Image (cartoon, rainbow, N blue to C red):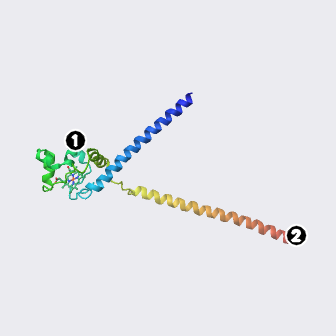
Amino acid sequence: MLIKNLIKTILFSTVIVLSTTYSNKTTAQEGKTIFNTYCAACHKMDKDLTGPALMGVEERWGNDREKLVAWVKNSANLIAAGDKHATEIFNKWNKLPMTPFESILKDAEINAVLDYIKDWKPAVVTTNTPGEKQATKISNFILFLSILSGVLVILSISLFFKMCKLKKMSNETLND
Ligand code: HEC
């Protein structure tokens, strides 16, 4: 009885964990696809292009998701309403208007792409520090030494056996 309940609980939680991971993955994937389709022509995450680099944009907008969605829908509306940040960014980019997406993307899709932007992180570049390089060199050397000693051990064992054989043969000839 207890085991049955335990199995039930485990199965149930596995299903929940799997489904949440799966649904999170699909929105992240969706956000990426939308970004590549509709935004990447003018935006990069870490470099200014036709439009500004978008990494950390949500913080620059004071984490105001509602306003960001409004911007992507139609930036001209926000600028006309006299929004401070919207006007600033518009002026900074030589009053180059951004494409309005209100008739192209649904709110959920705009949120998905904003989530993707928010979660985006630059690829970690693994440059070995000098200490690590030294360590790799040393461990490579140790590896080389162990291979060498392994070969030497095998060689001496086979030599030992050959010597035994030779001795035996010479004893036999002597005894003959
Ligand atoms: C035709 C080019 C173009 C496209 C396509 C475009 N943008 Fe923009 N975007 C701009 C420009 C230019 C600015 C700078 C503000 C301005 O001049 O209006 C901007 C600004 C922004 C800002 C504010 C940046 C900041 O630093 O505050 C956000 C957020 C943004 N875009 C998101 C998007 C998203 C999301 C998409 C895709 C759904 C997109 N943009 C597609 C040109 C574009």
Quadrant of the rendered image containing residue 155 = bottom right
Relative side of 155 to 3, left or right: right
Quadrant of the rendered image containing residue 68 = top left
Relative side of 123 to 52, left or right: right
Residue at x 30%, y 52% (from the top left corner): 34
Q: Residue furthest front?
A: 103
Measuring from the top left, give residue 43's x and y in whole percent.
24, 56
Dot 1 or dot 2, earlier in sequence: 1
Frontmost of labels 1 and 2 is 1
Residue type (three-letter) at the residue carrying disc 2: Asn
Q: Is residue 59 visible?
A: yes
Q: Relative to residue 170, is residue 106 depicted above or below? A: above
Measure how far apart labels 1 and 2 are at the Cα level: 104 Å
Q: Name the residue under label 2.
A: 175
Which mark is on residue 66? Answer: 1
Residue at x 70%, y 66% (from the top left corner): 159
- The local secondary structure at tag 2 comes to helix
